[in-house]
Structures are given as C-alpha cells and as structure tokens.
Image (cartoon, grey):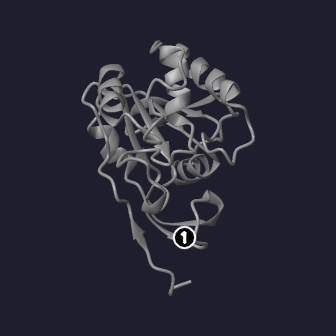
Amino acid sequence: MDNIPVEQHPLEPFLPENGRLLMLGSFPPQQKRWAMSFYYPNFTNDMWRVLGLVFHGDPLHFVDVPAKSYRKDAIVAFLQRVGIGIFDTASAVRRLQDNASDKFLEVVTPTDVEALLARMPACRAIVTTGQKAADTLCERFGIAQPPMGGFTAFCLSGQSFRLYRMPSTSRAYPLALAKKAAAYRVMFEDLGMV
C-alpha cells in the first residue's frame, strides 16, 4: 500500500465564527467528479438537495440545473447565516481504489477536530454525514456510536457536545431523498436551527 499516493485535503475548512454545528464528512471525491469547488461537490451527492428541502422546501434551491452544478454563493451565504461549519474527518487519505467510495478510503491523517472547534466557539454539536466519518470520529475520541438519525452526548476539552450521525447523502446510500431530508430535519429542529 505504500505505493498508493497520499492525498491531502484539497479544501480549507469552512468555519463561520457564528457556527453552532460542525458538519464532518469523510473526504471529498476526486476532483474530476466535482461540479463546484466546495464541499459535497459531486453533482450526484444529495447534500445540497437535502438542505434545500429542509430549509427552503425545495430540493433544487441550491442546484443550478442547466449547468449541472450548485449555486456556491447561495450555499456559502446560507451556511454563514445559519452557522454551519464544514470539513471532513480525514485530512489525508489513500484511495485504495480509483473511486469516491468511503469503503476504499484509508485515513492516513485524521483531522484535528479540536482545532476546528476552537475556531467555532459557539459550536456544541457535530454531525457526521456517513458511516466512515462516524467510525473515524468515534474511534478517535472513544465516543459511543450514535443511532442513525440520533446523537450521543460527549465531552471534549471540558465542553459538552452532541455527536449526531446522519445518513450519507451519497446516492450509493439506498435511502430516498425525502427520507434523508426527514432525518436531517429532526436534527436541525432539535438544535433550533430550522
């Protein structure tokens, strides 16, 4: 495996000062799959459709359908307004196969989550957006795995947090868009964000 190159994270953490929720995925797909230069960039990933549905009642709210892309400026403004930070649980990985599947990602360098949280002092909740992200974070901090759609309370650096585990927004995860959005809506309502 040493002959497989190590890939460094291609994006800077997105951490609004008013951030109340830190969203952590596993790692971005290869850039050849990107429809925009931001998080959840693959056009077949449903994250921006889920958030469009939850916050605006419209799965296409953040989607630029003719361009087969996303409305990055609208996404960034939305995230800043509601206080959602985004990064991933891995800062460096090896892709064991030439695809975007989490099951073929080897985490080389886990993300320094404490450093991210230090830049979001109002944050008291973390959400993992898929199983690989949940596994990586729970293993790193010795946190009990939350039930799908639920949370586990934990302490980090003397602060209390909730770790939510949400379904993956990848189309490879076999759950209808409306059901994914319903799970995310419960979390956002629980946090008083919607």
Pick the front one: 162 or 17: 17
Provide the residue designation for mark 1: 95
Judged left or right of residue 145, residue 193 is left
Residue at horizontal 47%, vertical 51%? 89
Residue at horizontal 37%, vertical 60%? 9
Q: Amino acid at mark 1?
A: Arg
Question: Residue 99: x and y, percent?
Answer: 58, 65
Q: Is residue 149 above or below residue 38?
A: above
Judged left or right of residue 154, residue 120 is left
- Taking the view exactly as shown, the residue that stands out farthest to the right is 174
Q: Is residue 7 above or below residue 123?
A: below
Judged left or right of residue 91, residue 81 is left
Judged left or right of residue 14, residue 54 is right
Image quarter hosting the N terminus: bottom right
- Taking the view exactly as shown, the residue that stands out farthest to the bottom is 3
Task: Give neighbour class at mark 1: few <14, some 14-19, many 20+ (Cα, 10 Å).
Answer: many
Pick the front one: 144 or 54: 54
- Taking the view exactly as shown, the residue that stands out farthest to the front is 66
Question: Residue 50: x and y, percent?
Answer: 56, 28
Question: Residue 112: x and y, percent?
Answer: 37, 53
Q: Is residue 32 above or below residue 58?
A: below
Pick the front one: 78 or 66: 66
> So how many labels did they put on this image?
1
Question: Residue 154: x and y, percent?
Answer: 52, 34
Residue at horizontal 33%, vertical 28%? 74
